[in-house]
Amino acid sequence: AGPAALTLAVIGAGWLAFQTSVASMERNTLDEVRAIAQMKAGDLGRWLQAQEANAAALAASVVAQGDLGDLDPRRLDMAKIQNNLARRGADFNFVAVDLIDAEGHSFFAANDSPAPEIAAATAKAFAESAPALVELHFGRSAVGPSFGFVAPLPVHASGGARRFALYAKLAASDHLYPFVFSWPLPSATGAGALARRDGSDVLFLSGVLRNPEAALRLRLNYADSNAPIVRFMRGEAEAMRGVDPMGTPVFAAGAKVPGTGWTLIARIDESEALADSNLYARNVGLVVALAIAAIWIIAGFVLQDQKLARVRADRNLQRRFQVTFEQAAVGMVHGDIHGRLVRVNRRACEMFGYSEEELLANNVLLPASPEGQAEMSRYVESLRSGASRAYFSERRYRRKDGSWFDAAISVSFAQGEDGAPDYLMVAIEDISSRKAAQAALAQSEERFRLALESAREGVWDWRPDTDEAYFSPGWKAMLGYGEDEIESRATAWRRVVEDEGREIFSRQFHEVRAGLRKSFEFETRMRHRDGRWIDILSRGLPVFDAAGRMERVVGADTDITERKAHEADLRLARAVFVSTHEGVCVTDAARNIIMVNPAFEEITGYSEAEVRGGNPRKLKSDRHEADFYRAIWKDIDAKGVWRGEIWNRRKDGVVYPEWLTISTVRDAAGAITHYVGLFTDISRIKESEERLKFLAHHDPLTGLPNRTLLSLRLTQAVARARNAANTHKGATLAALGAVLFLDIDRFKTVNDSLGHVAGDQLLTLASERWKKALRPNDTLARLGGDEFVVLLEDLQDAHEVAAIGRRLIAATVAPFALEHEREACVGLSIGVSLFPVDGNDDLGEQADNVIQRADSALYLAKQNGGGALYFYSEEVTAEANARLALESGLRRGLERGEFVLQFQPLISLKDRAIVGVEALVRWRSPSGLVAPDEFIPLAERTGLIVPLGEWVLREACARMKSWLDQGARIDVIAVNFSPAQLSRANLAERVAAILTETGLPPHCLEIEITENALAEPGGEVEAMLRALKNLGARLSIDDFGAGHSSLFYLKRFPIDKLKLDRGFVQDIPGDPVSMEIAVAIIRLANSLKVTALAEGVETQEQADFLAASGCALAQGYLFDKPLWEEDLLKRLLPAPESERAAG
């Protein structure tokens, strides 16, 4: 049992040792690939940042050196530009540089569409005003994947807003892939790869081990794949064991490449990483076997086995050392303690170009000069003596082929077991690429500095954490300051920049820090030392440290004061050129057209493209002889200018007159550079004169005679009638004439509901019908609006007048077909005045009197319902006088305070409580109480409704405030507003002033308006109602359903209450249609959260039906007739204590 138990213990200990070793190897490998991934991602991010800065510097250098000219598309020399860009791109280590527009189209390959990656980077670069990374893609050539940066150029095309950018191209095989694939430690399977997220896939940007052609071809599903790089992107692990896309078990770790959407994966085959574990397993197995054998045979064999294990470990260590030495990525050289070379690895041979034997025979590490050799000897002696532990240096070495390379070397001595120097170890790294990159960067920075100095830009460098700042001498000079007059703090910048500029910079700074933008760019103003403001274009880029924190902001400020002034002058000149109504034609010195303005195109009919490059002779009318043109150019040559009238021909062949001025433009040396022709189409002026003559006597809408021409013709007609009457004494009806005053019935309804355009069309159509109903010599004139006058002469009697009037009425009654398939039905009212029969028997009446009498007759026709013809009589005059008297009395009543208010309660149908009142105006004239339907229409026609309405509003608000102060429990007082009041521009201000004056809270006032008022065209009524609503007042539609009801009003206007018209209420419950309409309106109001109120409730049946239908409020004689204030207060105020006690 003892040996068996000891055997099991030995086996268990061996297994535990093996598992512990394997776990340690796995941890070490994962740590190693994690560190490599993070190191390579960080280095790659910094390298890309440097390339981005190179792209920005390249763009600035190209613009500053004028390589692109003025970017005028008509004068671009593409071959020259391409050569310039290629040369400057090579200075910055770019394989190619392309000039592209804002959509990514190349100017060097105009027929090719840009790659999506280039187009996307271009849009981003212009949106952020900073260089943008172009993702890896296959270009037009078959070289392989490429990428680069799009840098926007801070210039525009001459005369336009076209923008440009540079695409600085890098070949992935030259710069990117060697870095990604390299492995910093000796390894046969260690390699890197790049990928990025592409929709639902993960796209490999580089090849992978065992599949170098996978770049931009290999895709893995983001959701399903278990490849290590996909698992890293999903955030499952940073370092892991897994299976790569080629099916190989690997150890892998990922890292994000800063500033990109790329992910770098570092991987090594599991078989290589755990190779030592297999050897260890064999060793452990052997040890266990020997131990068991020792247990069962001889214990003495243990010592021998241990010795054998040490030998094997030494051998294994020697093998690993040999592998490390031979496969190191840097050159390794061993020498004896005297400095002679005894051993070199493969990489050292590759660096120097020698074989191992040649390299050992020639100590190429020794400097060529005696001084260098002496220095090297001193360092080696220092190392040998222990005074120094290592020696580091950078040197240049010559290869076997004669070329030179830069190298970083480290020299140290390996110590033996006794601590004494055993042999010399030298590590050599080829740093030619790094040195070249540093030199290129230094040259780039120098070129950038020179470009900035030549562009007279001021450079600044700000550290946000300390607020320290550097301002270049050029920056200080730009503001008029000396070198020592500006402190090295950002407060100096804050003192000179305007407030808006500080705000913009602060906002962009936070956006950059939050990752919302990559750079700073804005225009502002800074105060010069002499006190004036100068315009500044400020641009900057953030600089991040290795941890991704913003460390600095570096930028440049450019004085663009002159450019802004020049741009303003150009905009003004361009605006004048484009907007002037005079034609402008500009030619070169050879008189070839180079530019015309829109007025030229409009006047001549030729587009600019049709005349550009041609001669103005194209416009010749052939009305002038050759001597005429020779005289023109003789004057121009002598005086530099010619002015005069000339006939030219339009494109359509029409000849027209124009007033032309030709001026000469000369350069500083006095040489003629351009001719400028400025001309006006005189035919328009002449047409305008004829049109003005016509409009002086005719209506512009219908073309009919206007009041002026009618008055002239009527005066002549009256004179002819008077002469005829004097000639034919006793013949009463000889040469009888008549004036018919026409007014279209319901025209306002059409105009308000369908709009002014429809109203104008109706007037035109009606006048055409009337002309057909009249005799050829009759005069039809329009005075304005819908008022027309017909002048008739040579009539036999009044019956002939009546017959003509009936024809006019009949022609008007037929429906009018308007635009947009709309129809209008109207009528016609006519007032007739005869001459010389009516009025003075001595025939001395004037034309205006005849029209006035016809107007009086028309009023009578309108008062009696319209659609009729009335002749003037003395009774008509009497009625007109009565109207005038009523109007005078109305004016005096306003002045003398003859108007009073009555109040009709608004009742809640739920509990029959008074919740409000409607204010109703009454007129107590000296002759008695005047009914509202008599004086309200007159007040509206005369405009007196405005002061009357304001008096009603002020009085109602004052009464309501008084009642509230006395303790009345009432919510609102309603006041009617007429359309004339709503049309006043300052209505809201007047209402606010009255509410303030009376002290009434705005929510206690309800403004009632009619549907017809809402139908007024334009947005003035809507704006006024919203202003009243904003005061806090309530809005109500009166007589809803009786006018031009439109559900659009309820959506458009801020209505609080609908008042159901009494016409629907009075037929309840007898008329089912009225009941259905009432229920529909009530439900509509309730669904819109608008209060419904029924007017004219006179029976209990009506009240019960309305309450059951959901109507909230009502008013009418069932509850109360309009009350005087003292009667209303008896119902509103609580009874005095004595009355309650008596009750």
Image (tube, helix red, strand yellow):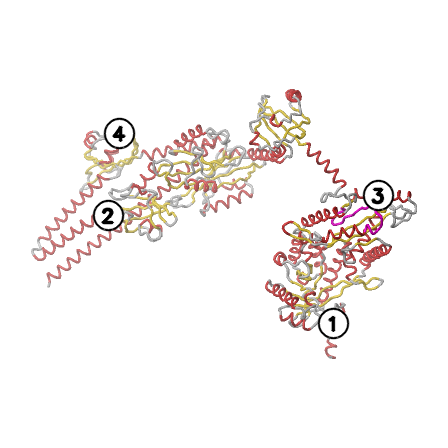
> Alpha-carbon distance for marks 3 and 4?
123 Å
Crowd tier of the residue under label 4, counting other residues whose Cα lies within 10 Å: few below 14, some 14–19, many 20 or above? some
Percent of width and height locating residue 848: 83, 46
The amino acid beneath tag 2 is Ala
Q: Which residue is mark 2?
A: 273
> Alpha-carbon distance for marks 2 and 3?
123 Å
- Foreground residue, 1115 or 223? 1115
Percent of width and height locating residue 418: 18, 42
Earlier in the chain: of badge 2 and badge 3, it is: 2
> Alpha-carbon distance for marks 4 and 1?
122 Å
Earlier in the chain: of badge 4 and badge 1, it is: 4
| Dots 2, 3 in contact, CB < 8 A | no
Earlier in the chain: of badge 3 and badge 4, it is: 4
Percent of width and height locating residue 235: 35, 52
- Foreground residue, 72 or 25? 72
Picture layout, residue 514 above or below residue 63: below
Classify the position of the N terminus by image quarter: bottom left
Q: Nearer the viewer, mark 4 or mark 1?
A: 1
Q: Nearer the viewer, mark 3 or mark 4?
A: 3
The amino acid beneath tag 1 is Lys
Q: Which residue is mark 1?
A: 1130
Q: Which residue is mark 3?
A: 717
The amino acid beneath tag 4 is Arg
| Dots 4, 2 in contact, CB < 8 A | no
